[in-house]
Amino acid sequence: MPYPHQLGFQDATSPIMEELLYFHDHTLMIVFLISSLVLYTISTMLSTKLTHTNTMNAQEIEMVWTILPAMILILIALPSLRILYMIDEINDPSLTVKTLGHQWYWSYEYTDYEELCFDSYMVPSTDLKPGELRLLEVDNRVVLPMKTPVRMLISSEDVLHSWAVPSLGLKTDAVPGRLNQTTLMSSRPGLFYGQCSEICGSNHSFMPIVIEMVPLKTFESWSSLMT
């Protein structure tokens, strides 16, 4: 969960999100170094009257400022491609859940169980209980086992939606007539919140997502009660 005046990302819950945070810090450090060098060069040029006429024909400098940016781009591109392949990789998921976007709620179906499906609506502000979060709480949470690879099949029945949970590093579009998939795995139990991240209409921000990660035995008990 984010907290007031938070400047950084939410705490990583999945291995993918941890890799994304590492890549963000890696890229931000490169940007910081480049910005510092450019700021130093500009300040030096503005604060001194000394000029060197030979720099206009300095082939060595031109070689440096051509090769160095190319090397920096490679240092950014290689980790980025690695994470992209990791996100698309699916390693024999133990559970498959299909989610459909509607205006203005989500419906979920556990395809490995018979008749285990439900709709998930946002809880109105007037019905919230103490400790529940406004505009983020739902009447039916998505209960999933932790430390277990889960495949999410995502689609929509009306307009474009986007199923996103920031702490898990997930953001997959729900497109009518198209079935997208993504995988998730939580390294710890807890409640993780998300919202529709596509401007699908005036009430797109009222489509919250709540994932409850529990131990495998707790999930089996919950699934037996639901079916």
Image (cartoon, helix red, strand yellow):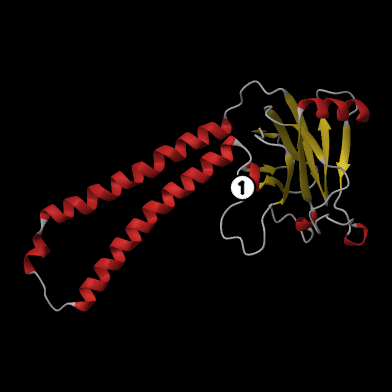
Q: Residue at x 23, y 51 (%)?
A: 66
Q: Would residue 227 be seen by someone viewing this image from the given angle?
A: no
> Which quadrant would residue 55 be assigned to in this image?
bottom left
Q: Nearer the viewer, residue 203 or 5?
A: 5
Q: Position of residue 9 (x, y in %)?
A: 58, 52
Q: Would residue 223 be seen by someone viewing this image from the given angle?
A: yes
> Which quadrant would residue 40 be assigned to in this image?
bottom left
Position of residue 17 in the picture relative to residue 43 (left or right)? right
Q: Residue at x 64, y 40 (%)?
A: 13
Q: Nearer the viewer, residue 83 or 36?
A: 36
Farthest left residue? 54
Position of residue 221 in the picture relative to residue 38 (left or right)? right
Q: Nearer the viewer, residue 191 or 196?
A: 191
Q: Nearer the viewer, residue 5 or 177?
A: 5
Farthest top residue? 92
Residue type of the residue flagged with mark 1: Asp
Q: Is residue 79 above or below residue 3?
A: above
Position of residue 164 in the picture relative to residue 103 (left or right)? left
Q: Which residue is mark 1?
A: 11
Q: Position of residue 126 (x, y in %)?
A: 92, 62
Q: Position of residue 145 (x, y in %)?
A: 75, 30
Q: How many numbered circles does the render carry?
A: 1
Q: Secondary structure at mark 1?
A: loop
> Which quadrant would residue 210 be assigned to in this image?
top right
Determine crowd level at label 1: few under 14, some 14-19, many 20+ residues with C-alpha closer than 10 A. some
Q: Is residue 137 above or below residue 142?
A: below
Q: Residue at x 6, y 65 (%)?
A: 54
Q: Residue at x 29, y 50 (%)?
A: 69
Instruction: Locate the C terminus by quadrant.
Output: top right
Q: Position of residue 34 (x, y in %)?
A: 33, 57
